[in-house]
Image: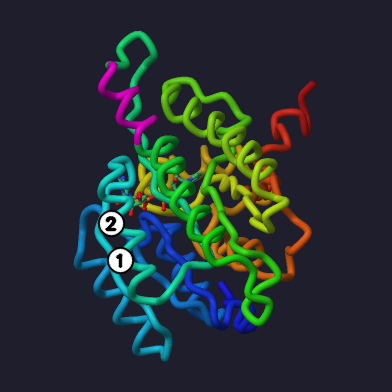
């Protein structure tokens, strides 16, 4: 996958939650390549975060690792304070951390429901609130960006595509769609842009079972008109664009990066 190398984020500081794995790690690499300083949040696997920080520094970028569980208010607040103290402020939040904990609906426990909503939706609220407070405190710095700040909410095609067996996950992402739009509406006049990225099937640990055997991958490809599984860097590129001034007139929108998964592929021959 070619990497866009234009330095459109020079001078900007980005925090990426769940940045030590999969899509978050690709977003961190892409934003660092575009010139941003990147803070890589992790809740587990500190080694992966450290390795990525090192990789970015060796390539000439600036990065740090910061631990926090995004569903815990105290930890989120400490994480933002630490990044802002180190770099003076923050320009970009990529609220990416997310989990799946699947079960047939009648067997789904309250714990499974609560945990997925806590990370995937409450985590977005806690992080976005801290980011908006910092963007408002600092305001627009025209040499850095047209906007006072940018938030990218990592959603899923399942914010509009129902998903049996994953009711907690789909509900969290559906909720995130309206969360993103409502915050965007509230803060647009303060020059803060809030958008979503909804990935289709991207090759990462979260959905390993869906692509790791040839049979599973063949089944998955039936859902993807573009006939390939997504690469995490497909999302990295979209995130750089949404964070850059090239998308300055874009807010409250979701970019579906899904190889056409939301095009109802069954209707190509059916219907
Ligand atoms: P992943 O499992 O590789 O990454 C998820 C990241 O979130 C990990 O770094 C994990 O440690 C972190 N995380 C989990 N709970 C956390 C918590 N409480 N606090 C902080 N971090 C936490 O999977 P991924 O595919 O890279 O997923 C990233 C995002 O993309 C998720 O929000 C996911 O829902 C979304 N997404 C992924 C796909 C896909 O096909 N891979 C499709 C649609 C949406």
- Are dots 2 and 1 in contact, CB under 8 Å? yes
In depth, the one of 116 and 209 nearer the eye is: 116
Say which residue appears at 54% left-offset and 36% top-offset.
176
Q: CA distance from mark 2 to mark 1?
A: 6 Å
In reply to whether residue 112 is colored magenta, the answer given is yes
- Is the stretch drawn in magenta largely helix, strand or loop? helix
Position of 119 relative to 139 (above/below)? above
Q: Residue at x 56, y 58 (%)?
A: 136
Total tally of numbered discs in the picture: 2
In depth, the one of 217 and 140 nearer the eye is: 140
Q: Is residue 71 magenta?
A: no
Q: Position of residue 220 (x, y in %)?
A: 52, 40
Nearest the viewer among 32 and 180 is: 180
Residues in magenta, as a range: 110-118
Camera-nearest residue between 115 and 235: 115
- Locate residue 45 relative to residue 150 in the image: left or right: left
Q: Secondary structure at mark 2?
A: helix
Residue occupying the point 70% across, 35% down: 265
The residue to which callout 2 is attached is: 78
Q: Secondary structure at mark 1?
A: helix
Q: Which mark is residue 82?
A: 1
């Amino acid at each position: 996958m070619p990497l866009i190398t234009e330095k459109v984020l020079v001078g900007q500081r980005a925090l990426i939650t769940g940045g030590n794995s999969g899509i978050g790690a690709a977003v961190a690499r892409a934003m660092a390549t575009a010139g941003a300083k990147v803070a890589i949040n992790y809740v587990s696997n500190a080694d992966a975060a450290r390795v990525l920080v090192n990789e970015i520094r060796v390539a000439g970028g600036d990065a740090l690792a910061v631990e926090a569980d995004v569903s815990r208010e105290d930890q989120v607040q400490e994480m933002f304070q630490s990044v802002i103290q180190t770099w003076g402020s923050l320009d970009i939040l990529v609220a990416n951390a997310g989990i799946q904990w699947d079960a047939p609906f009648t067997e789904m426990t309250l714990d499974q429901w609560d945990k997925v909503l806590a990370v995937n939706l409450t985590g977005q609220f806690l992080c976005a609130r801290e980011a908006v407070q910092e963007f408002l405190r600092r305001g627009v710095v025209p040499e850095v960006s047209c906007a006072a700040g940018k938030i990218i909410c990592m959603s899923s095609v399942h914010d509009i595509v129902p998903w049996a067996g994953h009711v907690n996950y789909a509900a969290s992402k559906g909720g995130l769609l309206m969360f993103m739009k409502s915050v965007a509406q509230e803060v647009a006049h303060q020059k803060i842009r809030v958008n979503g990225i909804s990935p289709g099937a991207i090759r990462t640990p979260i959905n390993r079972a869906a692509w790791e055997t040839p049979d599973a991958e063949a089944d998955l490809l039936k859902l993807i008109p573009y006939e390939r599984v997504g690469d995490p860097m497909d999302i990295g590129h979209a995130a750089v664009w949404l964070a850059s001034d090239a998308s300055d007139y874009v807010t409250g929108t979701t970019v579906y990066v899904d190889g056409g998964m939301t095009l109802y592929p069954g209707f190509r021959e059916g219907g």
